Amino acid sequence: EGVELANAQLSAADIAEGSDNDMISLPHLHEPAILHAVSERYFRGEIYTWTGPVLIAVNPFQRLPLYTREILESYRQEGFIRSQNLGDTNAKPLGPHVY
């Protein structure tokens, strides 16, 4: 009897839902799984990934439209709404970001 080390591939629907935003949800959290998850997100232009409360950032070596006023304002608003326990609890949260 062996030990399963590979993580199951996420479907496109799972990825669209944001199931890969937090690596803590991976069935196996080890170096190969972390590297695979981070590289998959990198190639989709998603350079930020959570691992529980820790934010992992990968240098994209290019300019990405991640720091616009609109994005800053959306994260500020979500943070304010969440801090006041307001808003729709079923709403999809914003993905990992330095804001």
Image (tube, grey):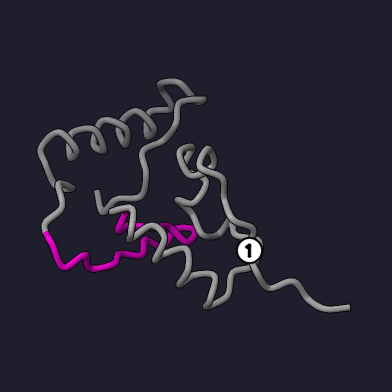
Q: Looking at the image, which residue is at 51% across and 25% down?
A: 90
Q: Looking at the image, which residue is at 55% across and 59% down?
A: 24
Q: Is residue 30 above or below residue 57?
A: below
Q: Position of residue 60 (x, y in %)?
A: 21, 64
Left or right placement of residue 40 versus residue 69 in this view: right
Residue 32 magenta: no
Dot 1 crowding, Cα within 10 Å, few <14, some 14–19, many 20+: some
| Amino acid type, mark 1 | Asn
Please give the range of residues in magenta.
Answer: 46-62
Q: Position of residue 38 (x, y in %)?
A: 41, 65
Name the residue carrying label 1: 7
Q: Looking at the image, which residue is at 45% across and 26% down?
A: 91
Question: How many numbered marks have been drawn onto this rendered protein structure?
Answer: 1
Q: Position of residue 99 (x, y in %)?
A: 24, 48
Q: Is residue 86 above or below residue 92?
A: above
Q: Position of residue 98 (x, y in %)?
A: 26, 54
Residue 54 magenta: yes
Give the quarter of the image for residue 30: bottom right
Secondary-structure class at tag 1: loop
Q: Is residue 56 above or below residue 96?
A: below
Q: Looking at the image, which residue is at 66% across and 61% down?
A: 27
Left or right placement of residue 99 versus residue 25 in this view: left
Q: Is residue 23 above or below residue 20?
A: below
Q: Nearer the viewer, residue 74 or 65?
A: 65
Residue situated furthest right in the rendering: 1
Give the quarter of the image for residue 93: top left
Report the quarter where the N terminus lies.
bottom right
